[in-house]
Amino acid sequence: MSVAPRHRLWLLGAVLLIASGLFLVWGLRAPYGFILGLRVTKVAALLLVGASVGAATVMFQTVAHNRLLTPGIVGFDALFVLLQTTLVIMLGGVGYVSLPQIPKFLIESLTLTAAAVALFSLVLRRGADDMTRLVLTGVIFGILMRGLTGFMQRILDPSEFAVVQQATYATFGAVDPLQLSIAAPLFAIVLALSIRIGPSLDVAALGRTQSLSLGVDHDRLVLLVLTLISLLIAVATALAGPITFLGLLAASLAAASIGTYRHRILIPAAAAVGALILVFGQFVFERLLGFQSTLAVIVEFLGGLLFLFLVLKRRPT
């Protein structure tokens, strides 16, 4: 007897809850309050980043009509690295490290969101029916920003370059609780709105012509969805750094495990899978294997393999 998609979603939630509990209490030692507080902050960051990237990727794939794409393809990661490099050049290594965390987080989040919304509005100003042009424009901008970043990093001295490298690697050990207090409510609002427009996304997945014939304002919906995606990815990237292929893993595993393309179920499922990948992966590396700062590398490696598999699996049209 098959399990209903909604029940599978609840099962995913239960597994995520168990994994989070294991991360919090496994090997807990005195001083309990201090260590537990650090772990709660890290788990919250893992949950928020994983859920944001997973949900955003599902919506991006829907409006792009391509299950191989992730929001990182339009240059979020390249812009984040360029922003960190620019700050180090302007302030110096010591000045950058001395930046207050909350203003820095807000600057990064607002810059990433504003840049993404500006790109979407500029490219899609004549209508939201040309996502291919948007993706290609994002790829080109990403290449340009990576080239500019590479040039800027060449003029840094070794100590400042080390600061840039540390700042551009995804890490969950240095997340400020105040950052989470800002990011969490924003994430909850955006995710709730994303789930609310799930039925419209079901229609949008059929294509622009079918959407318009069924009474859905496709262009306005796509611009709204892209804005929500920008907020989710900007907050997640500013909070912990870029993890390009996490979304592809989360979206693919969610679709396979849930067995439905109804977005009111698929979006929270992808959010749960993305969070579960980070929480369980960090638990294995930190608690069982005793490794540090290797999860992002493994996620990127597995995501890259999945991307190659999906590309090779597709039949030519």
Image (cartoon, rainbow, N blue to C red):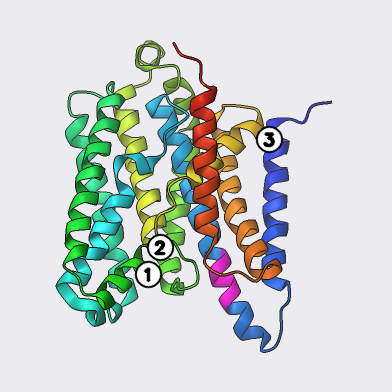
Chief secondary structure of the magenta span? helix
The dot on residue 169 is 2
Residue count near mark 2 (Cα–Cα under 10 Å), binned few <14, some 14–19, many ≥20: some
Is 39 magenta? The answer is: yes
What is the CA distance from the residue labelled 2 to the residue labelled 1? Answer: 6 Å
Q: Can residue 72 be seen in the rendering of this structure?
A: yes
Is 89 magenta? The answer is: no
Q: How many marks?
A: 3
What is the CA distance from the residue labelled 3 to the residue labelled 2? Answer: 36 Å
Residue 102 vertical position relative to residue 146 in the rendered view, above or below? below
- Residue tagged 3: 6
Q: Can residue 228 be seen in the rendering of this structure?
A: no
Closest to the camera, between mark 3 and mark 2, is 2
The dot on residue 251 is none
Closest to the camera, between mark 3 and mark 1, is 1
Residues 106 and 89: in front is 89
- Residue tagged 1: 166
Q: What residue type is labelled 1?
A: Gln
Q: Which of marks 3 and 1 is nearer the N terminus?
A: 3
Q: Residue furthest right?
A: 1
Residue positioned 39% across, 28% down in the render: 63
Residues 286 and 225: in front is 286
- Looking at the figure, which quarter contains the C terminus? top left
Residues 206 and 88: in front is 88
Residue positioned 55% across, 58% down in the render: 47
